[in-house]
Amino acid sequence: MSPTYAAPPPGHIPLDGPYYDLLRPGMELPRQPGVTLDSGLCAVYQALVGERLALVQNRRLCAEVTGSPEPLVSPGLLMALSVGHTTTVSRRVIANLFYRDVRLLRPVYQGQTLETSVRVVAMRDARPRPDRPPRGMVLVACESTADGAPAITYQRCPMLPTKGPDLPGFSDDIGSGAATDHPTGGIDLSACAELVPYDWRLDLLGQPDAWEVGTTVADPLRDYIDNTPALGHITHNLAFVHRDAEASPYQRRLVNGLQVAGMAQASLSRVLHGMAAVVAWGYCNHTGPVFEGDLLSFRHTLLGQVSAAGGRLRAVRTEATAHRDEDPSQVLDWTLAAVTP
């Protein structure tokens, strides 16, 4: 017989759930502990995804380009931590349907402390079906701060099961993610250019490359993915499906989508000469499951670019494919705004 737990005191993270039918629009979820971003955490993340951004790896170069005595923290790690913090709402997640309006508002450096809040904005019951338990969609607003200053904002929409047999009857308009047919992948380059620090010396990162808009570059280096529980541990990701195979609909532990995105970012940095940072996402669609032991390949398409702070801001579509059998399948379709010389 499974143990039962009393409801936790206000502000405490429950041991189970929350379930869809126990949430309400306007609710603030309990906060996870803030994380001080140190060199050890950054090194573990590098080992898991192959991080190679120069401003993350090279303290001297980072100081010359940004003026900070501490290295930049990878935008991939920041997003993995931020999303991990928001899993107080999605421990029982069935799927994350979309991200929306992802903005990295300021650079974050080692030594700063990241804290995240999450609030339920809207809810919508999923259409009942006789072949599955009841479930619903929860739109949440997420904000992370670095040493108290706003650093990341976005919305995401997990689908959650109910605890009881009945749906609560919510029918809010939750919208959708960015349109995949948008010319620059749902990224407003002119608006996002304001997120590029005006005082960075991007010219110190090397000569601009000649990648032409509309062309695709396939990275010949495929990569092996494993150790997904480790990423969950360091990012406070509480989703059951990334740790417990029995909680997964595939009866196999699912790889955290932010680990796939981190490896895709590492691949893009091999393609984009002098890539400095990521300041926004358009859409991020996890189009298929990823399992430990998969071999991933990546390709990148330049969708558009504008001048920004003495360099360029470039909208890129990044796709990942899993090679686990005779029929490779796409597992990630992601657009992001990358800063380069």
Image (tube, rainbow, N blue to C red):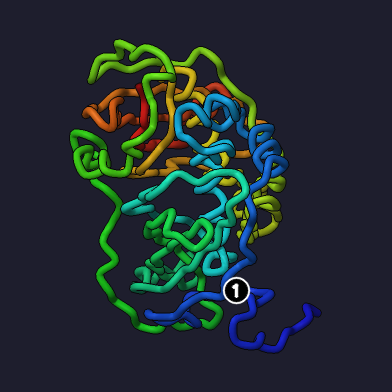
Report the residue marked by disc 1: 17
Q: Is residue 189 above or below residue 322?
A: below
The residue at 36%/30% (across/down) is 339
Of all residues shown, which one is farthest toward the right?
1
Q: Quadrant of the N terminus?
A: bottom right
Would you say 293 lies left or right of 171 here?
A: right
Q: Position of residue 200 (x, y in %)?
A: 38, 32
Residue 115 in sight here: yes
Q: Nearer the viewer, residue 56 or 261?
A: 56
- Under tag 1, what secondary structure? loop
Q: Position of residue 301 (x, y in %)?
A: 32, 23
Q: Residue at x 25, y 14 (%)?
A: 212
The amino acid pointed to by label 1 is Gly
**Residue plotted at (57% across, 40% down):** 259
Residue 167 seen from this side: no
Q: Which one is nearer the viewer's eye here, 87 or 21?
A: 87
**Which is nearer the eye, 201 or 124?**
201
